[in-house]
Image (cartoon, grey):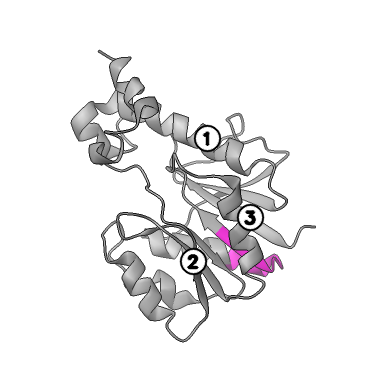
Amino acid sequence: MNKNLIIVFTRNPELGKVKTRLAKTIGDEAALNIYKFLLEHTEKTIRNINSDKAIYYSVQLRADDIWDSSIYQKYQQEGEDLGIRMLNAFKNGFEDNYEKIVIVGSDLFDLEAKYIEKALNKLDNYNVVIGPAEDGGYYLLGMKNLYPEVFKNKAWGTETVRKDTLEDLKSESVFLLDELNDIDTYDDIKHNQTLKSFILQND
């Protein structure tokens, strides 16, 4: 068994249920197509990284989707908010005797394997690794011990998440990766021709 685990949280790609803030500007169908594209990009990015991998579904597990069951462990997210769901996923991983666990978002056009590999490597010398998102949150969180306070009392989806998380970890060694932009609103895609092409397809 590999001692590293990469966790991906995914929403089931259903019309009207994903990228709702983006959908307000470009419509549900284009938002769904963009999300499917980002999911496929995430899968391709992590597929060949030397680590075990686990997918946590928002609603129900899917057997026949882009996440090959021979590569990806599949679980259901559990908990009343994003923080508790992430906490439970990390707990599961540590209880399965993984030594380094990284969770990464599934809505990053700029995600590359090198960021995740760097996070896993940096956990040799740091307690926590964070991949800062431009919106004040984070796209990646890596740990080799569980810090439950990181997942509690946060205004998820707001610009204070990373600041509050770093405050929780002020007595720990934390490495910050490059800042990336996750895709939540039209502003996040307006200069991205690849993603904007999904809007034009629906006109």
Q: Is residue 163 above or below residue 109?
A: below
Q: Nearer the viewer, residue 51 or 10?
A: 51
Q: Which residues are magenta?
A: 91-102
Residue type beneath disc 1:
His
Q: Which residue is labeled 3 in the image?
A: 117
169 relative position to 74: left or right: left
Residue type beneath disc 3:
Glu
Q: Which residue is labeled 1 in the image?
A: 41
In front: mark 1 or mark 3? 3
What residue sits 73% from the left and 39% below the top?
Answer: 70
Q: Which residue is labeled 2 in the image?
A: 87
What residue sits 47% from the left and 61% below the top?
Answer: 86
Q: Is residue 93 magenta?
A: yes
What residue sits 44% from the left and 79% below the top?
Answer: 169
Q: Position of residue 80 (x, y in %)?
A: 37, 60
Q: Is residue 83 above or below residue 23?
A: below
Q: Earlier in the sequence, mark 3 or mark 2?
A: 2
Q: Position of residue 73 (x, y in %)?
A: 66, 47
